[in-house]
Image (spheres, helix red, strand yellow):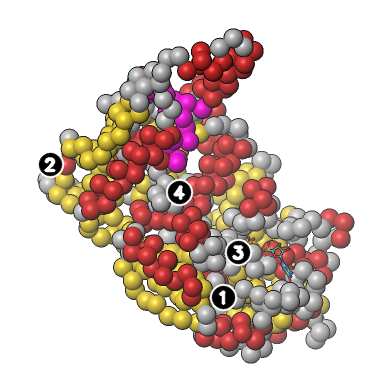
Amino acid sequence: TDLSRIRNFSIVAHIDHGKSTLADRLIQSTSTVADRDMKAQLLDSMDIERERGITIKANTVRIDYTANDGNAYVLNLIDTPGHVDFAYEVSRSMRAVEGSLLVVDASQGVEAQTLANVYQAIDADHEIVPVLNKIDLPAAEPDRVKEQIEDVIGIDASDAVMISAKTGIGIPDVLEAIVTRLPAPTGDATAPLKAMLVDSWYDAYLGVVVLVRVIDGTLKKGERIRFMSNNTVHHVDRIGVFRPGMQPVDILGPGEIGFLTASIKEVRDTSVGDTITTEKKGTEAMLPGFAPSIPVVFCGLFPVDSAEFEDLRDAIDKLRLNDASFSSEMETSAALGFGFRCGFLGLLHLEVIRDRLEREYDIELITTAPSVIYNVYMTDGSMIELHNPADMPDAVQVDRIEEPRIKATILVPDEYLGDVLKLCQDRRGVQLDLTYAGSRAMVVYDLPLNEVVFDFYDRLKSVTKGYASFDYQMIGYQEDQLVKMQVLVNDEPVDALSMMVHRTRADARGRVLCEKLKELIPQHMFKIPIQAAIGGRIIARETISALRKDVTAKCYGGDATRKRKLLDKQKAGKKKMRQFGRVEIPQEAFINALKMD
Ligand code: GTP
């Protein structure tokens, strides 16, 4: 294809501002898909994405469009993941295209993810076309939102395209804007092959499918190619484009986006952002800034029913086929038995994987407290990366501990600002910036990641009635006063409840945790002490009183069926319990105990 007739673009937006709906309209209005094959949110393929309305994997589609100038254009849309946990994937897919449509809900205005994503687009040197969506809504305020885009983001919004992705208003204008306002790609067809590995996923029939953007040279079927990051060589079996179904082609030239398959067995053998070239006479120059995604949040996943351990292993293996960014390694816990220590890109990523294991594979799980990676410097000068608080070395051998910190950007309506500042302050935050755009405040905080991994999103949502938006990026490690807090139930340490806490917060955290466990653990026939401890020092204590023996007898005295029902119920409930010494702890206790309020 003639380079001047190609436009590559992505759509950046905050969640729910209408990115998927717009993509659907673009596909539909150009008859890329026959009407009868059109289903809502065509680009969101996984069920869970559909349910939660979150786009997780980058997806792509090639659209043929004859513009008002009479010429036929090829428009390649790469759909980027909308969530902060996938920031690295967003930044790579941004580098595969030249422009972005910035979609803003005209009834809502700019949100935290609008900002985070548009900054990525600006970083990638994109030409940006602002698009105001949902102008069909009575609450739409396009003028105010235009002003906000100019004030907050600093780009000209005077000729923003006004649309309703829902009703179809303005869709032809979007297509024209793509052709006339976004630049064509540049590239040299005669240079050695240089292509970017934008994404990859596992397909049961084809093996690993690799999404590529050709920069220079041509990618040909039957050729031998090299992945430059790990220097592996593969034979290209298939090349094609997405319309949005897979359609084979023989070559992909500069500026083009498509896929290849090359008998690659695992997604792990491919790295997003990698440079692909030919085995012989390839390019010397790798694409800049290659950095693999690394997990930052860890937790233990254990089957509630220990007989399901093998099922869990299989399920994790299957999920890992398609998600190389999540790590897993076997873990044994004195309390929980066999399970896996898993690493995730962030909290949402953790939730998505846990959900899929429970729903698609039907495995009930106990999730231990999420933890970040601490750098533990030992007195002998060595350094340990601590992924699991249970592995914390003895305090006397530890010189100092560093924890990861993030830069968080929060956009919030004025009236909730006070609550948000308090929340951030309570989580050991340091305010970096506070600005206003209309009736909204933008607050920037430096926060410890470990204070965010518990339930920061939930708290933020509840104190702002859902009106705040939030985004973050890692900024590095900093030393702080961190200690390991243990929980003892009936004098037995429960390693799954161990956590790293800041020294000044330990007493309060320990107290709350013990109080909650007292509520969450049912009474037994004996007294159960619950204690929180740092080293050998007990910092909080609660006691669950013993159950009086005659309780069932009294309530259910003569009625045999009711008594049996009660026993059946207890039996069903047992499945969700775990035995710790003589004490049974329900699985919700683990999750709920760790929430702070
Ligand atoms: P994520 O995939 O979660 O990032 O969301 P998204 O940005 O793709 O938003 P999506 O397209 O799923 O739209 C969110 C909601 O807004 C859906 O309920 C849409 O039906 C609705 N919506 C999208 N465009 C319009 C519009 O122009 N007008 C109105 N009234 N509703 C719209």
Q: Nearer the viewer, mark 2 or mark 1?
A: 1
Residue 116: x %, y % from top left: 50, 70
Q: Secondary structure at mark 2?
A: helix
Q: Amino acid at mark 3?
A: Ile
Instruction: Give the distance between the C-alpha atoms of the residues marked 2 and 1, in whole angstroms.
Output: 50 Å
Residue 543: x %, y % from top left: 31, 30
Which of disc 3 and disc 2 is earlier in sequence? 3
- In the rendered image, the quadrant that contains the N terminus is bottom right
Q: Which residue is mark 1?
A: 110
Which of disc 3 and disc 1 is earlier in sequence? 3
- As drawn, the label of residue 344 is 4
Q: Secondary structure at mark 4?
A: strand
Q: Secondary structure at mark 1?
A: loop
Looking at the rendering, the stretch of residues picked out in magenta corresponds to 575-592
Q: Nearer the viewer, mark 1 or mark 4?
A: 1
Is the residue under label 1 in contact with that under label 2 (CB below 8 Å)?
no
Q: Is residue 455 above or below residue 412?
A: above
Which of disc 4 and disc 1 is earlier in sequence? 1
Residue 111: x %, y % from top left: 55, 71
Q: Amino acid at mark 2?
A: Val
Q: Is residue 190 above or below residue 320?
A: below
Front-most of residues 469 and 556: 556
